[in-house]
Image: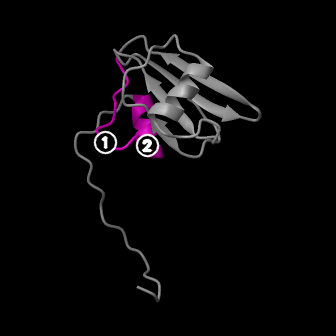
Amino acid sequence: MLRINAGRIFLYQGQCDMRRSFDRLARMVSEELDQNPLSGDLFVFLNRDQKKIKCLYWERGGYAIWYKRLEAGKFIRPDSDTNELDQTGWMNLLEGVEVKVIKKQPRYRILDEKN
């Protein structure tokens, strides 16, 4: 499983040609996701049939790419109106978990004096 020190995780919503490499993926991040590819964030791309995933990130002076092809099944794109994934969404994507209904249960929290 991919473990990097990325800040945020962004999923490209379209289909990506997996022949694209560092420079073209970085240009897609800038132009289509409107993000800085040098930020250290993780940028995730899926191909048309969602059997391949490619991740681009900046690491200590250079771009790095992580690439995986599934032999069975496919990566399930989360239902979301945002490009940004949280850690749970990222893990669900990698593990092939399809979430139909998400309901977060209330948790206790201490209110500050200002609230």
Q: Are marks 2 and 1 in contact (CB under 8 Å)?
A: yes
Towards the viewer: 33 or 41: 33
Towards the viewer: 48 or 112: 48
Q: Position of residue 54 (x, y in %)?
A: 51, 22
Q: Which residues are magenta?
A: 73-95
Residue 18 numbered tag? none
Mark earlier in primary sequence (2, 1)? 1
Q: Could you tell me the amino acid type at mark 2?
A: Leu
Q: Position of residue 44 (x, y in %)?
A: 49, 30
Residue 6 colored magenta?
no
Query: Furthest residue to the front?
Result: 31
The quadrant of the rendering that contains the N terminus is top right
Determine whether the residue tagged by mark 1 lies in a helix, strand or loop.
Answer: loop
Give the labeled residue for mark 1: 80
Q: Could you tell me the amino acid type at mark 1?
A: Ser
Residue at the image position 47 percent from the left and 84 percent from the top: 112
Q: From mark 2 to mark 1, how far is it between C-alphas?
A: 9 Å
Q: Position of residue 48 (x, y in %)?
A: 35, 16
Image colouring: one colour
Instruction: Determine crowd level at label 2: few under 14, some 14-19, many 20+ residues with C-alpha closer than 10 A.
Output: some
Residue 81 location, quadrant? top left
Residue at the image position 66 percent from the left and 26 percent from the top: 64
Towards the viewer: 85 or 81: 81
Query: Furthest residue to the right?
Result: 61
Give the labeled residue for mark 2: 85
Q: How many marks?
A: 2
Residue at the image position 31 percent from the left and 42 percent from the top: 80
Instruction: Determine crowd level at label 1: few under 14, some 14-19, many 20+ residues with C-alpha closer than 10 A.
Output: few
Q: Position of residue 19 (x, y in %)?
A: 52, 10
Q: Is 6 placed left or right of 48 in the picture? A: right
